Amino acid sequence: MMMSYNHPKQSGFTLIELMVTMVVAMVVMAGMSSLFVSQTRTAQELNRKSEAMNDLFLAAQIMQAEFRGAKAVCWDVGNGSNGWILYQPLSATSVADELTAACTQKTQNNGYFQLKPIDLINNKPTPFINWKRVGMILNAELIRDMKADLGITITPIGNADLQAVRTITLISQYRDKERKLKDLSLTFKVWPRNTQ
């Protein structure tokens, strides 16, 4: 008598099936990686944009607070786009005729905000707004990453009416997900105090 063994039929994946599965898995993983990188870049861009907007908002709040207590607000046109917004406090003893002269003088009794260019010597790698407070000898950086030459704009430009309502625009820059510079602006109005 002869014995026969019945081996159960082994089933498994063929080499082709394994390769197809691996290719499909790699395509899915590549898609997920691409989505993750894209989402990370978008999140970083939104974070940079949010930080830039917060900085602009804080700078605008500080400037508005200083201008609210000003007798006059003027723009030093003689220095072009790198000029300064000068303000004279209510405590100044100048009479109205002297206000125009005060608008062209950076004295200890006046305050100003000035757009400054890149200054690598003093570790200022981007254009920034310099702030000199009333009564202070030294000045300090208020905000960085401003747009060169157009970081501060003011209208009306002329100083014929120092009690005029002025519109000030601050323009900052941030990098988008392609690492290109994008502008971000904030506009506010200034009403100097009535001194009469």
Image (tube, rainbow, N blue to C red):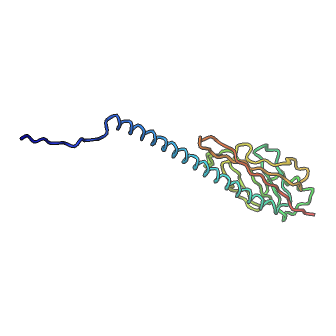
Q: Nearer the viewer, residue 6 or 153?
A: 6
x, y percentage for residue 173?
A: 67, 46
Task: Name the image quarter holding the C terminus.
Answer: bottom right
Q: Residue at x 91, y 60 (%)?
A: 95
Looking at the rendering, which quadrant does residue 162 occupy? bottom right
Give the mark count: 0
Which residue of the protein is positioned furthest toward the bottom in this rendering? 91
Which residue of the protein is positioned furthest toward the front in this rendering? 1
x, y percentage for residue 127?
A: 67, 46
x, y percentage for residue 140?
A: 68, 56
x, y percentage for residue 132?
A: 73, 57
Would residue 7 be visible to someone looking at this image?
A: yes
190 w.r.t. 157: above or below: below
Would residue 115 be visible to someone looking at this image?
A: no
**67 with respect to 171 (left or right):** right
Q: Residue at x 81, y 49 (%)?
A: 154
Task: Name the image quarter holding the N terminus.
Answer: top left
Q: Nearer the viewer, residue 84 or 52?
A: 52
Q: Nearer the viewer, residue 137 or 189?
A: 189
21 w.r.t. 40: above or below: above
Q: Nearer the viewer, residue 33 or 183?
A: 33
Which residue of the protein is positioned furthest toward the top in this rendering? 16
